[in-house]
Image (cartoon, rainbow, N blue to C red):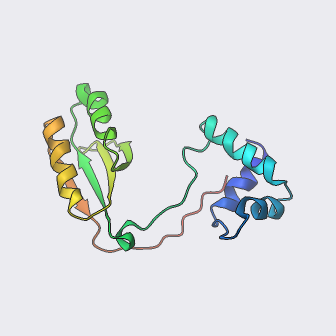
Amino acid sequence: MDAIDKAIINRLQQGFPICAAPYQRVAEELGLVEAELLSRLQTMLADGVLSRFGPMYHAEQMGGALTLAALKVPGERFDEVTEIVNSFPEVAHNYARNHLLNMWFVLATEQPEQVATVIAEIERRTGLRVFNMPKISEYYVGLQLEA
């Protein structure tokens, strides 16, 4: 990553303009042309520098639901269980943790009642108990990571 890539990442964490030509506006703010901005974004995605570039939706405000869930996965089954869990389109993130509950993931569903259905299916397919930790309160942290 060079200084321009870092500037792109830092700028895009601040929000994306809602206008007819958002990429052009961001490019101009950074002293670039739109084609260069798009090319650099595509390269960072292809190289794995960025794992994702897209909007973050507030599922609850759209009628859906989010929950944090965890599993206690035996070490010898971790890869197998990871494949099963990640096969669900509702799984937004899945991370290994150094904890008794060693697999943590986020479920995002279109309807609140789907959370229980997906959890039950993950339990059925893995044979493991899913610990569901729904959000009780929401806090805005405003995290921005400096590239």
Q: Nearer the viewer, residue 83 or 39?
A: 39
Percent x, y for residue 54?
Answer: 56, 55
For image coordinates 38% across by 73% down, the residue present is 61
* The residue positioned farthest toward the top in the image shown: 76
Q: Is residue 41 above or below residue 29?
A: above
Percent x, y for residue 87?
Answer: 32, 38
**Is 128 placed left or right of 98 in the picture?**
left
Percent x, y for residue 17?
Answer: 67, 69
Residue 49 falls in image quadrant: top right
**Is 132 placed left or right of 42 in the picture?**
left
Quadrant occupied by the N terminus: top right
For image coordinates 24% across by 25% down, the residue present is 76
For image coordinates 17% across by 44% down, the residue present is 121
For image coordinates 21% across by 41% down, the residue present is 72
Residue 110 falls in image quadrant: bottom left
**Is 129 placed left or right of 49 in the picture?**
left
* The residue positioned farthest toward the front in the image shown: 20
Percent x, y for residue 104?
Answer: 31, 47
- Count of numbered circles in the view: 0
Q: Is residue 101 above or below residue 126?
A: below
